[in-house]
């Protein structure tokens, strides 16, 4: 994960990894497509570089979890219209492996009850799907233990990838800049900027595609 450092190390003190910043400042669709297409390679790099602590989080390999997040979980969300405690725990493992490891988060997630996770996530899904209230859905999800704005954005990005980008550190660094703020106002700023970029790149682009491209370029560059 990019942190403040010297420019000579390839990290911009204000906006993170240089290559991701360069991509963010570009409107060249070909460059963005290359960034997005490199996401598969990015996941392979992450899998190879997991720390011991990250590896111990689950018996499932990162590649397997990624497939579950990208292919199975969206279908499950749409059919069941809620999140389960097991799914939340599994999703948190993936988040902690894809990005920065934070030891306390898994313990906080486990403090939730099954009924609370289902009830709160169900209400959040209704807010964003039926009422187009992304902010309300974000606030509702943060009522769960261990779920801050970043994790809430991850959950909603799986349900509504065209509306909600995941607040990954790498994408936030490049588009919003440092220091990192995991707050609802920061999410709104981040989402607005990625919406604008997606519009610049063309109607086929979504905020999630923009996040994936920025994330991949930053990970592969460091």
Image (cartoon, rainbow, N blue to C red):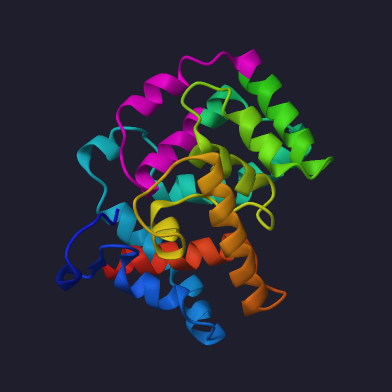
Q: Is residue 10 above or below residue 111?
A: below
Q: Is residue 35 left or right of residue 17?
A: right
**Which residue is drawn at the image coordinates 39% and 26% (left, top)?**
106
Quadrant for the C terminus, please.
bottom left
In front here: 194 or 108? 194
Residue placed furthest toward the right: 130
- Residue 68 visible? The answer is no
Q: Main secondary structure of the magenta part?
A: helix
**Which residue is drawn at the image coordinates 52% and 38% (left, top)?**
149
Q: Give residue 2's quadrant in the image.
A: bottom left
What x and y, as percent, mark residue 145?
50, 21
What x and y, as percent, mark residue 20?
38, 70
**Which residue is drawn at the image coordinates 29% and 39% (left, top)?**
54
Q: Is residue 190 left or right of residue 204?
A: left
For the image shown, how many numbered marks are present on the structure?
Answer: 0
Verify whether residue 115 appears in magenta: yes
Q: Is residue 79 above or below residue 35?
A: above
Verify whether residue 178 appears in magenta: no
**Which residue is drawn at the image coordinates 16% and 65% (left, top)?**
6
What x and y, as percent, mark residue 155?
59, 40
In front here: 82 or 177? 177
Task: State which region is magenta.
Answer: 89-116
What x and y, as percent, mark residue 33?
53, 79
- Residue 221 visible? The answer is yes
Q: Is residue 20 left or right of residue 127?
A: left
In front here: 3 or 116? 3
């Amino acid at each position: 994960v990019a942190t403040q450092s010297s420019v000579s190390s390839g990290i911009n003190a204000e906006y993170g990894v240089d290559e991701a910043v360069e991509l963010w400042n570009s409107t060249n669709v070909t460059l963005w497509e290359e960034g997005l297409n490199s996401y598969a390679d990015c996941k392979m790099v992450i899998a190879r570089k997991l720390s011991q602590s990250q590896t111990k989080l689950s018996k499932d390999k990162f590649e397997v979890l990624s497939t579950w997040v990208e292919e199975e979980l969206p279908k499950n969300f749409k059919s069941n219209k809620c999140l389960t405690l097991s799914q939340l725990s599994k999703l948190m493992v993936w988040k902690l492996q894809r990005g920065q490891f934070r030891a306390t988060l898994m313990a906080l997630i486990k403090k939730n009850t099954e009924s609370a996770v289902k009830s709160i996530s169900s209400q959040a899904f209704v807010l964003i799907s039926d009422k187009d209230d992304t902010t309300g859905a974000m606030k509702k999800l943060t009522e769960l233990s261990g779920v801050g704005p970043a994790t809430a954005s991850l959950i909603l990005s799986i349900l509504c990838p065209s509306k909600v980008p995941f607040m990954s550190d790498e994408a936030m660094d490049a588009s919003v800049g440092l220091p990192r703020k995991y707050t609802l106002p920061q999410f709104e700023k981040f989402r607005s900027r990625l919406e604008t970029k997606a519009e610049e790149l063309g109607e086929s682009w979504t905020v999630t595609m923009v996040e994936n491209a920025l994330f991949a370029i930053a990970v592969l560059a460091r």
